[in-house]
Amino acid sequence: MAPKNRWHRRPAELLRVDENFSFADLDHRATPGWTGTKAQGKAFGASRGDLLSELQERLYAHGRTGGNRSVLLVVQGMDTSGKGGVVRHVMGMVDPQGVALRAFGRPTEEELKHHFLWRVRKALPTGGQIGVFDRSHYEDVLVARVDSLVEPEVWEKRYEEINRFEREITESGTTIIKVALLISRREQGLRLMERLHRTDKHWKFDPADVDARTRWEDYQQAYADMFARTSTDVAPWYAVPADRKWYARLAVTELLTHALIDLDLGWPKPRWKVDTQMRRLAATMEGDTLAEARAAAKPTRKKVKRQEQEFAALVADARR
Ligand code: AMP
Ligand code: MG
């Protein structure tokens, strides 16, 4: 039996950042909308795999037949907030062929010669793809601002540039989901210390992480302004409490699932006639093979019909 859907309200409604968002009121350990336990959450998240794969296959098919729709998942968060885990988790549930993953680190010399959106444009998903950004153009109003990498006049005008950029790409068919994984300062301390205790995690540690941590308040302010200035109707932010990793993963899975459902993509219609192609193919087959193929027709159609019904039931359950 499939695990029960224990979302009582959609994370898309509950986590969406609007003008009422406040860091002071945020409970980083909260699990908004999910009424089950951690184990139930994990089981349910895993069960979303079937639905997500079919939704992604539809998107991919749409792209392969010339469609322009795509989805871009932008993942932001402080060090140790679980960006990598969310990315790995999402990627594990879909066909890697249809995913375009890009992690944004410090800009290279080449990248620094260009406008900050240059490297981002090159990494955008094309029709049919799910793009995943591990960090993004938002670093250019976060670290760039907190570490004074550019003058205030420069980062100040980036908010509007980002809004224009995101509007443009939504208009060309991309659905943007922006998630900020929000951990508490206390939880970050624990996670960083754990990395230092574990020789197998030292590779993940960067002394610069401690520098960023000492500027926690500045980062909170930069995040708050980023939310206030760039959570738009076309590309809203979702503030995901992330002290519980399982919840953050479950919530992002649900956001992605709903974004794909909302695309409402059917299977593309072929540009050729099925009957004609069947006749042509039949003419190339031996009598006994043809008989076998004909006998398989009914069960095959039945199987497809059953799959369609299962898919429709999953979509209806997700939408309820
Ligand atoms: P990580 O995601 O842990 O591999 O770290 C990547 C590092 O690159 C972080 O310290 C980011 O702040 C930094 N980074 C990403 N984008 C930019 C940017 N546009 N300008 C400066 N630093 C950046
Ligand atoms: Mg890091």
Image (tube, grey):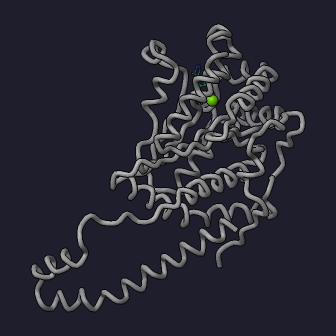
One can see residue 83 in this view: no
Q: Is residue 61 left or right of residue 112?
A: left
Residue beneath the point at 39% across and 51% down: 67
Residue 136 drawn above or below residue 65: above
Which quarter of the rendered picture does the C terminus lie within?
bottom right
Residue farthest along the top direction in this orientation: 151
Q: Closer to the camera, 268 or 43?
A: 268
Residue 34 drawn above or below residue 294: above
Q: Is residue 260 left or right of residue 220?
A: left
User: Which quarter holds ligand 1?
Assistant: top right
Residue 49 drawn above or below residue 219: below
Q: Is residue 50 left or right of residue 14?
A: left
Q: Quadrant of residue 28?
A: top right
* Image location (x, y in percent) of residue 9: 77, 60
Q: Quadrant of residue 5?
A: bottom right
Residue farthest along the right direction in this orientation: 25
Residue beneath the point at 42% across and 51% down: 128
One can see residue 262 in this view: yes
Q: Closer to the camera, 273 or 92?
A: 273
* Image location (x, y in percent) of residue 291: 20, 92
Q: Quadrant of residue 74?
A: top right
* Image location (x, y in percent) of residue 91: 52, 50
Which quarter of the rendered picture does the N terminus lie within?
bottom right
Q: Closer to the camera, 137 or 280?
A: 280
Residue beneath the point at 41% across and 66% down: 267
Q: How many marks?
A: 0
Residue beneath the point at 68% across and 16% down: 145
